[in-house]
Image: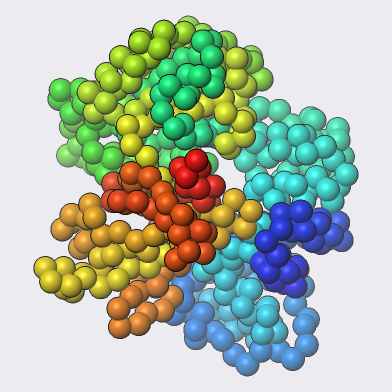
Amino acid sequence: MVQTSADVARDRSRTRKTEVLAGLLGGAGDAELPIVVAWLSGEIPQGRLGVGWRSLSKAAPVPASEPSLEVAQVDTAFSALASANGPGSTRRRADILASMFGAATEPEQRFLVALLTGELRQGALAGVMTDAIAKANGQALTAVRRAHMLTGSLPETAALARAGADALSGVGLEVGRAVAPMLATPADDLDAALGLLGADLVVDYKLDGARIQVHRNGDEIAVYTRTLREVTANVPDLVEVVARLPCDSVILDGETLMLADDGRPRSFQDTMSRFGSGPTAADDAERLLKPFFFDCLHLDGDDLIDRPLSDRLAAIDSIAPHLRIPAVTRPTPEEARRHFDAALADGHEGVMVKSLDGRYVAGRRGKAWQKVKPTHTFDLVVLAAEWGSGRRTGWLSNLHLGARDPDTGEAIMVGKTFKGLTDELLQWQTAEFPKHETRRDSHTVYLRPEIVVEIELDGAQRSSRYPGGVALRFARVVRYRPDKTPAQADSIEAIRALLK
């Protein structure tokens, strides 16, 4: 498995990555398969193990000369790390790490360090891994992709694919189990989006909030984030709203944000702070999260995920028209423009233009959802930061920015910027970035590719300075995106599209 990881990291061809991964998956035992898929996707089934660079540096004995570690052994060690709590746990965790690393060869040690620190980025992201799962098991790619959307789990999808076509086709929508979300494709402008989708469409406000997926089954309610993390305990105000809906079971997709007294959205940072930490006794009406829904995947025993968007919107209107995101249906171009202008005037980001005939499909497959903003904005990965000078002396300032390679998952540098950084953001960067540091020199602190930042820019230009052959024009920081992972950052292809 470690050799496969290295081979995949070296090869930029998606086809060859798929073939190499499929060969490994085909030879994995039934018990090993879900673990191998998780690890090669950069995930640990046991979740975050709380193992940092300091612990790993202490647990780096001389590598073993011959390989002996099995997947099951390492998985057992990870389970032991996850359960090591209470008095004496620090020593137990150190012993577990020392034993595991002592049995690992040098390549295996490097793999384990990358996996435990979240740096395993050899290009086996969901798209490539689903291709490999399908190929390894001789299953239809569409069936594998659908199973992954409905389960939200690559390891579970791999096990289903091995079990056969009937197992894959038997996966259905399940209230209480998060669904991989559908995402939008950036449009050049409103006219381009309208021209692409025709007249049978809906134009929604694009809110500056946090993506939510709400499941209700009787009295049981669960709320999930964009990354499928459950946050129900943090959002009792949302739970209360959903509990009052006149239905027994429902799955709703939408956004949540805090509103000021005048009905305008409060800052994204305020919403994310409240969304991530939960309410306090001192919270008042201003800090309540308000939900807005734009899709319905299930209602009272009826799965709607394969129905056109028009049917799904009708389902929202039947139980929660007051929670529907502001929208105009089948507008004229003039009406769509007025709605776009109204969204901006109300303090929102722009609009989403959606085909009323479109089905719900995870990720950015197809162009049924188009997002339109007044300027180009992209979610990029922070690769490094340079120390400031003059008034910014002592602060980490100039950011090195990377766009996601859609085939490898690696971040490819596309530019730098120090514009748009407030004193508050400079202070936050200087405190936060060293927690993600890999190395530094006298001018720059280099980071693990973990932090996502939203960047506004006027366009892009061809450049031989950066490896992707493209550079940002007049880039400036809008905000940081703690709700997004590097895998959800925008691709370099989206930046290159600005050259056309």
Q: How is the image coloured?
A: rainbow
Q: Which percent across, then down, holds residue 355?
A: 54, 18
Residue 112 seen:
yes
**Farthest residue in the left direction?**
391
The image shows residue 76, relative to residue 293, as above or below, that is below
Give the quadrant of residue 322: top left
Q: Which percent across, then down, holds residue 484?
A: 44, 47
Q: In this image, 449 relative to 68: left or right?
A: left
The image shows residue 185, relative to residue 154, as above or below, that is above
Q: Which percent across, then down, holds residue 227?
A: 50, 44
At horizontal 48% and vertical 64% (from top left) the residue drawn is 464
Image quarter in which the N terminus is found: bottom right
The image shows residue 424, relative to residue 392, as above or below, that is above
Give the quadrant of residue 260: top left
At horizontal 63% and vertical 80% (from top left) the residue drawn is 109
Residue situated in front as seen by the camera: 333 or 285: 333
Residue situated in front as seen by the camera: 397 or 162: 397
Residue 312 seen:
no
Residue situated in front as seen by the camera: 22 or 379: 379
Residue situated in front as seen by the camera: 281 or 154: 154
At horizontal 84% and vertical 59% (from top left) the residue drawn is 23
Give the quadrant of residue 375: top left
Q: In this image, 269 relative to 10: left or right?
A: left
The count of marks equals 0
At horizontal 28% and vertical 65% (from top left) the residue drawn is 398
Q: Which percent across, then down, holds residue 107?
A: 68, 80
Q: In this image, 412 relative to 415: left or right?
A: right
